[in-house]
Image (tube, grey):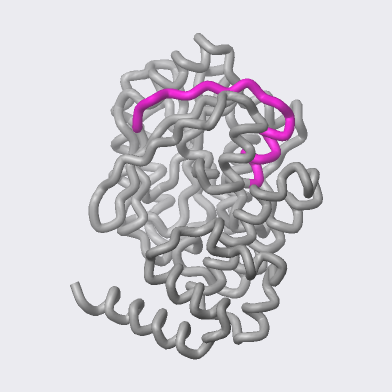
Amino acid sequence: MGTKVSVIVAVYKAERYLHRCLNSLVEQTFEDYEVLLIDDGSPDNSGEICNRFAHKYPFIRVVHKANGGVASARQCGIDCAHGEYTIHVDADDWVEPTMLAELYQKAVQSNADMVICDYFEIRRKEVYVKQMPTALKADAVLRDMLNGHLHGSCWNKLIRRSCYKDYHICFPQGLILEDLFVNCNLCLNNIRIAYVNKAFYHYDCFTNRTSLTQTPDRMNMHSRIAFVSYIEQRLDAEAYREELNSLKCLTKKVAWTSQLYNKKEFLDLYKEINPVYTRYQEKHSPTAISLRLCLSGHYVLATIAFRLWRFVKTHIK
């Protein structure tokens, strides 16, 4: 017999903060839900922590699997889930007690395939982040995610589980933007969307600084570029020109902050958007200023300025 909501937690090297996450899930005011802990071959004590919680709480299930990355863990969770709806929670984050109750209530009231909510982002302090779509239409949400107006994550979105099967959507192996991939593909199928004007999710960008999304390497960058190529092939390039340009500019910004590329490699990356880059990115941050210097022909000066700013930010509080 199915349950109303399946919460999927991909777990890898999470022993330092996993208790915080799981305690927030067992404290939910909602009654008919399950928690799936996907131990992705963790070499630390994460698997044992999962086992202890599952032994104590009958609505928690654990799957231990060989390490395959977060996308494979999330897909494993979808494959094992029994819930009418699913939501993903990262092991280094935590949620408010009424999250499942309020999101599920909205889903039922609206007969929605996806329910989006606001969230809290934690860096050096906690900030409330609004996630109101431009319109409650799949195409509008797709555009909002591509241009950065909405976060592409799965953790602030309750999704009808049958959509994955009906639209043949799986988490892609080897893509760093696996959440955005899934949500964009869902929206390409004109799903029904609702929005809750409230934050339930605490997105911790501060505790786990080794996260792949915060410390990009060459593989990370290749994955981001592969996603841009994929979505560009799926969309009408003219109809989505602004959104695709915005996505390319964001990818170029990540490439710049990674400092992984030499001058030619960086300037050649989406060189067609170099002249219009500043239309799509913030104007006054140190990163944006150094990037404008670079794209205006002052590559060496821009590199020195950016590295100096990063050194100051890292070493001086």
Residue drawn at 52 percent across, 21 percent down: 194
Q: Nearer the viewer, residue 48 or 158?
A: 158
Residue drawn at 59 percent across, 67 percent down: 252
Report x, y in % for residue 268: 70, 77
Q: Residue furthest top?
A: 109
Occupied quadrant, residue 58: top left
Report x, y in % for residue 179: 58, 45
Residue drawn at 69 percent across, 71 percent down: 271
Q: Residue furthest bottom?
A: 300
- Residue 47 in the image: above or below residue 264: above
Occupied quadrant, residue 314: bottom left
Report x, y in % for residue 282: 45, 59
Q: Nearer the viewer, residue 166 or 316?
A: 316
Q: Quadrant of the C terminus?
A: bottom left
Q: Is residue 313 magenta?
A: no
On screen, residue 138 versus residue 98, left or right, reads right
Q: Nearer the viewer, residue 5 or 13?
A: 5
On screen, residue 99 versus residue 317, left or right, reads right
Q: Which residues are magenta?
A: 181-199
Residue drawn at 40 percent across, 61 percent down: 44
Q: Is residue 188 magenta?
A: yes
Report x, y in % for residue 223: 65, 63
